[in-house]
Amino acid sequence: MTRRDALAAFFAQGVASRGVKPTPRGKPSGLPFPSRLIDVGAQAGLVHPTLCGGVERKDYIVEVLGCGVAFLDYDSDGWLDIFVLSGTRFDASAEGATNRLYRNNRDGTFTDVTAKAGLTRSGWATGVTVGDYNNDGHEDIFITYWGHNVLYRNNGDGTFTDVTKQAGVGGNGKDWGSGCTWVDIDRDGRLDLFVSNYVGFDLAKVPKAGKNPACNWKGILVNCGPRGLPTTRPYLYRNNGDGTFTDISERSGIAAATGSYGLTAVAADFDGDGWPDIYLAGDSTPSLYFRNQRNGTFREEGVLRGLALSEDGLEQAGMGIALGDTNLDGRTDILKTHFSDDTSALYLNDGEGNFSEATLRSGLGVETRYVSWGAGIVDLDNNGYPDLFVVTGSIYPEIESKLPQYPYRTPRLIFRNLGDGRFEEIIAESAPQSSRGCAFGDFDNDGDVDILIWNMNEPPTLLRNDVTGGGNWLKVRLEGTKSNRSAIGAQVTVRYGGKMQVQQRVAQSSFLSVNDPRLHFGLGDAATAEITIRWPSGATENIRPVPVNRLLHIKEGKGVVSTHS
Amino acid sequence: MIALLLLVVAVPDRIHECIEKQDRQCLARELRSFNKAGSAAYLSAAAEAFLLLGRNNEAVAAIAGAVAKKPNDYDLLLQQGRTCQRTGDQVKAIESFLLAAKLQPRAAEIFYNLGLSFFLLHEYERAGKHFKHTVQLDAASDKAEFMLGVIDIMQQGNEASAKAHLERALALQPANPHYLLHYGVLLAQLNERDEADVILEKAVKADPSNPLAHFNLGRLAKQRNDLAKARTELEAAVRLRPELARAHYQLATVYRALKEPAKAAESVKLFQKYQEQDRDDEPIDGPPAYAFRDKPVQ
């Protein structure tokens, strides 16, 4: 018996992160939810399974974690393309496993252009971040691996070049790279790179599932980790502006943050000072919040800011992170997903980077059944109130046959925003999967948010959102001039129909994934909207009221340069 | 001869007097001339005294001597079992309890103690069987009902059963602060927060010196955004137990919400200072002392 068991049984301090019981479901609101999510992945051409370890059992944790996905516009044609990471296997059945790039054919279908783009690569890919690090107008791709990480420079002609070595961002090849995000830490207009690591994983030293009795879940022997495996530390690379990067992990203070199993990393300005901070989900360890000190250094303030632990001060299994303005107060809130027997956590921002947990009072406590991964704060029905979307999936395929109450494939969850600080859970209609990463974006340019989902050893899911009778919308594409060209780190505030909503342009969120670079605002029945942009450079720009239901291309210092409706 | 007999009879009585007074000096004085060849009654009293003084090996030896003189004495076997139980030798304790059970197969006390020893060996299924048998023999055994509730709490998913057991324990001992605390926390875990609040208020009233009752009451208050009450209760919790890390963490969030950043920062520091004492993998010695009490704490 451990101390915590004893505390739970005898001292009863409250077990917040394990054994959390769901709160009662209230009376259904009865309100219509005019968003229908239809899986069109197969008909769209997303037919290749994304491999990651064994199907029936997982011998090592590296087979369990899965990968991220990305919506990006790699050919700058205004239509979202799809990038899907892949793991591999320890046996020969992994033949053909590779990350895949799918070009949008602009008719609801995609073409696999992986080989043509020069992106064929096998290995244990984990996380992805997309951004124009060399400001040439083309989105580049960085991928973390168990092994060396990889940076692909977009050549602007539909192909990519592996520039990892010359850029100096490949890591030591021993760490297991996980969360990664482009972030302009010093506001010099060049994207720097933050990379976290999950665990120190040495195949020769970690016992196979079944070999160590201590590695069990609900009494059944499973793969070992993350607890018991060594922690590593995150890295920060400064962009030198000449295609190379300098490792500034030590001098920035980032390297001091040891002791966390880092997963998804999100860079955004949480405290409203105009400088990007970094929030890193920690699996079974405290989540870390690196506050930008505006001098090239960061200070870890997770506990101080209320973002590190559960409300009882307990470690949680932090997986994915979503950002958004859930209560329309103009501040960036955080949704963090966790393991089963726990809730996802909603943290409300006071505007100065102090967070209070609103999980129970917002209604999220009703759901504790599933291991939750990728997530988004997105207005699915365009009614002007951002909803929550979460993908789920067990990590132990071998459990289901012995404990049927713990299925491997589990549903997607929607928490629709009721507009009064509360959310109501709706189970999405699509088939259950063991999912991990997911990305949000409007792949068919019809004015609503669609969803791309990574599934374990299955083809990806592409949920096309068909909103019927929903509200108006506005989409904003930003282009930095003084700021980094991708405008990563920009904050956009939209005022509509007496409401205000803020969003930030980030380069990784959900679970190790990348969303549509264009920010989408549902507007309800508002006919016009006002926009304020705070660029990563610090400049602020106000856009006069604009008509709705269109995409605005806004260039830093030049206002709206084009619109598409 | 008569005088000698009186002396022999009087020594255990004097030891009992010292025990009654909880007078350690008195006990030490009486045991200075400990006679391991004394009578069974004397050795029994001495064993109890050694145990109170924390001289566990001598306690075990003394009660073993007593049992050797009267191997079929139910009370001595029970005492031997409990001495071994308290000093950590659960296997020997179980042996003694089983011998006692042969002498008095319908003595609920024996089966409660058998359950407790199996519980301490982490054999919860067998422990549960003995606690259930205890309740069959003595429907008024609040201790057995309580322990059945504790076992159910440990086996996540058995909350409904745990609740029923704790309710029966409380029906028998309505003011027991431990029962109230466990029941209140269980209700909170089951999200029956209004009821939990009422029960935890009772737990605090029954034992205002219990930091965990204040902590859990404060936690509930914070969940419903009653920051003033949360602050009062959590401050009481850390006053009573400064190393209660999680209460400091909760206090930090309360201070932050109350816009008292300096106090929040101080609470964070205290949380970090004490957090290491509450690690997941830190083993414990055993359950708290109240699990051994013959009678619930009033």
Image (spheres, rainbow, N blue to C red):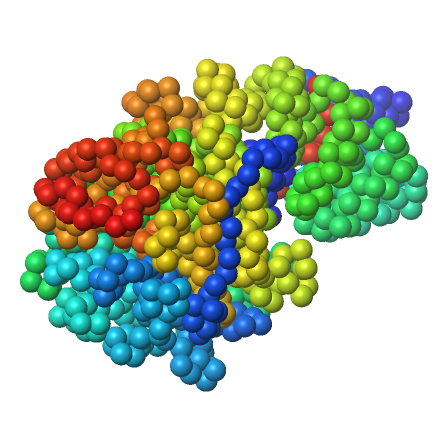
Q: Residue at x 55, y 25 (%)?
A: B220
The percent coordinates of residue A480 (x first, y second) are 14, 49
What count of labels does the image hold?
Answer: 0
Q: Quadrant of residue B253?
A: top left
In this picture, is A358 found above or below A462? above
Where residue A289 sits, quadrant-wise, is: top left
Q: Nearer the viewer, residue B129 or A407?
A: A407
Closer to us: A209 or A123: A123
* Residue B256, placed above or below residue A204: above
Going 80% across and 41% down the picture, which residue do you hit?
B131
Q: Is residue A220 left or right of residue A295?
A: right
Residue at the spot 42% in from the left edge and 59% down from the top edge: A452
Whether residue A127 is visible to the viewer of this picture, yes or no, is no
Question: How far across and down, in percent of the image, does residue A383 sit?
Answer: 43, 37
**Does residue B297 appear to the left or right of B254 in the view shown?**
right
| Residue B99 higher or lower than B188, as above or below | below
The reply to whether residue A518 is in sight is: yes
Residue toward you, A401 or B131: A401
Q: To which quarter of the image does residue A351 belong?
A: top left
Q: Position of residue A482 (x, y in %)?
A: 8, 47
| Residue at 39% from the left image edge and 49% from the top image edge | A448
Query: Where is B120 relative to A513, above or below?
Result: above
Q: Residue furthest left?
A: A242
Q: Position of residue A302 (x, y in %)?
A: 33, 39
Residue placed most toward the observer, A512 or A488: A488
